[in-house]
Image: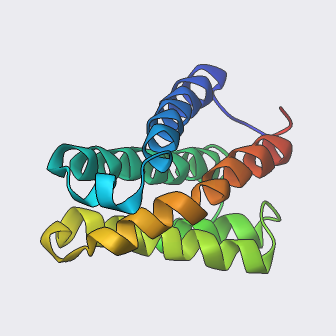
Amino acid sequence: MEYNEDKVRKITSEILTAITNLEDLQKLSDKEFIADAHKIGSAKYSLIVAIEGAVDLSNHIIAKNGYRTAEDYADTFKVMNQQGAFDKEFTASLIQMARFRNRLVHIYWDIDDQELFRIIQSRLGDIKRFLKEYGSFIGI
């Protein structure tokens, strides 16, 4: 498996920092979270960083190893699934994650704050699982 260790380490560090920020926000009640525009903005930014990091790590492996070029962010995880990195069920979760990132970036004004709070409460494990399975796939 070909990869640039420094690049993987740097992107992983950024993802872990974003997760730490999101875990701090997890501790808030829904009322505290929704009442604070700065916390909402922080959550959106941290999710974008974490999700884009996962996509960037995947695209790095795709490019370094000559896998099929992904057509978009969601397809990146399909390519990784086709190479055996993730099972079908988890790949579906990663695809949902990529689509949510697109919503955050392109139609951020249409993100329901309650939905954002629910995602922070219930889906951070997907990003952690990504890092674990990605590491196993590339052999670290």
Q: Quadrant of the C terminus?
A: top right
In the image, residue 120 sits, relative to residue 50, either above or below, namely: below
Q: Nearer the viewer, residue 63 or 44?
A: 44
Q: How is the image coloured?
A: rainbow
At x 61%, y 24%, the residue is 9
At x 37%, y 66%, the residue is 116
At x 54%, y 60%, the residue is 121
Q: What is the number of callouts on the image?
A: 0
Q: Is residue 71 visible?
A: no
Left or right? Give the position of 135 relative to 110: right
In the image, residue 10 sits, relative to residue 139, either above or below, namely: above
In the image, residue 23 sits, relative to residue 12, either above or below, namely: below
At x 28%, y 43%, the residue is 42
Q: Is residue 136 visible?
A: yes
Q: Nearer the viewer, residue 45 or 13?
A: 45
Q: In the rendering, at what x and y percent does residue 15 appear?
A: 52, 37
Left or right? Give the position of 46 relative to 13: left
Q: In the rendering, at what x and y percent does residue 62 appear?
A: 62, 54
Q: In the rendering, at what x and y percent does residue 83 appear?
A: 78, 65
Left or right? Give the position of 41 relative to 29: left
Q: Nearer the viewer, residue 90 or 118?
A: 118
Q: Quadrant of the N terminus?
A: top right
